[in-house]
Image (cartoon, rainbow, N blue to C red):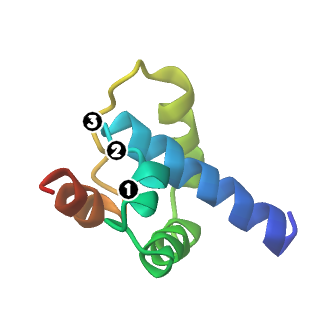
Amino acid sequence: MSTDSQRLAHKKMVLRMADRQGLDLEEMSLRAELSEEQFETAVDRCVGCTQPTACKCLLDSSGPRLALPDFCRNGDMFADLQAK
């Protein structure tokens, strides 16, 4: 998988996981609650994950809400954004 396609796949996973946490990152970005730098850092953390296949399986098989998996490297960011 090329670097660009890998990064795009992880961007989608970050957005999907955030959505399952009740967070609309695109809307938060428009309201200046999430900077582009913060989002790109989240994608970088996701790219560095050792369990992207498990994450994708969770996202593909779960309902509208999903308990954040223990291995998610963006858990702290999602929690901080939920507290806003």
Q: Residue 60 in the image: state x and y as whole percent.
A: 57, 27
Packing grade of label 3 (10 A; few <14, some 14-19, many >=20) is few
Q: Which residue is mark 1?
A: 28
Q: Residue 69 in the image: state x and y as whole percent.
A: 32, 46
State which tag comes first along the sequence, 2 or 1: 2
How far separated are the C-alphas under marks 2 and 1? 8 Å
Secondary structure of the residue carrying numbered label 1: helix
Quadrant containing the N terminus in the rendered view: bottom right
Q: Which residue is mark 3?
A: 67
Q: Are marks 2 and 1 in contact (CB under 8 Å)?
A: yes
Q: Residue 51 in the image: state x and y as whole percent.
A: 51, 56
Give the label, 3 or 1, closer to the camera: 1
Is residue 46 or residue 32 the one in the foreground?
Answer: 32
Amino acid residing under circle 2? Leu
Q: Which residue is mark 2?
A: 23
State which tag comes first along the sequence, 3 or 2: 2
Is residue 69 or residue 33 the one in the foreground?
Answer: 33
How far separated are the C-alphas under marks 3 and 1? 21 Å
Amino acid residing under circle 3? Ala
At 56% across and 53% down in the image, what residue appears? 52
Residue found at the far top of this picture: 63
At 62% across and 58% down in the image, what residue appears? 10
Give the label, 2 or 1, closer to the camera: 1
| 35 sits left or right of 16 in the view | left
Amino acid residing under circle 1? Met
| 79 sits left or right of 63 in the view | left
Residue 48 position (above or below residue 57): below
At 55% across and 34% down in the image, what residue appears? 57
Residue 52 position (above or below residue 38): above
